[in-house]
Image (tube, grey):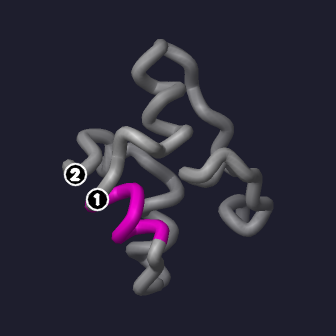
Amino acid sequence: MSKCPHLSICPTFQRFRIQNIKSPWIKMYCMGHSELCKRKQMLEIGKEPPVTLMPNGNSSGALMR
């Protein structure tokens, strides 16, 4: 388990943090098993993940609001 090195640039993490959401997403992906995060996986191969991409690979329009 490891904290994600991309927290400072991740819109998913920033949105949850700003809205003070105690999200299982943050616990699971951002602060736990960051190697499972689809956003991190894309960044590590040099691709920019869509802003709507959630850590599990699903898309959420809620991140655009």
- Residue on which the image places disc 2: 1
At label 1, counting other C-alpha atoms closer than 10 Å, the crowd grade (few under 14, some 14-19, many 20 or more) is some
Q: Residue at x 47, y 29 (%)?
A: 41
Contact between marks 2 and 1 (CB within 8 A): the answer is yes
Q: Residue at x 73, y 51 (%)?
A: 58
Q: Residue furthest top?
A: 46
Local SS, label 1: loop
Give the image location of residue 60, x and y in percent. Answer: 75, 60
Magenta stretch: includes residue 28? yes
Give the image location of residue 53, x and y in percent. Answer: 66, 47
Q: Residue at x 71, y 60 (%)?
A: 64
Give the image location of residue 50, x and y in percent. Answer: 67, 37
Local SS, label 2: loop
Q: Residue furthest left?
A: 2
Magenta stretch: includes residue 12? no
The answer to whether 59 appears left or right of 55 in the picture is: right
Q: The magenta stretch spans which residues?
A: 25-31
| Magenta stretch prevailing secondary structure | helix
| Mark drawn on residue 8 | none
- Rendering quarter of residue 31: bottom left
Q: What amino acid is found at the position of numbered circle 2 in the picture?
A: Met
Vertical placement of 18 versus 25: above or below? below
- Residue on which the image places disc 1: 32
Q: Residue at x 75, y 52 (%)?
A: 59
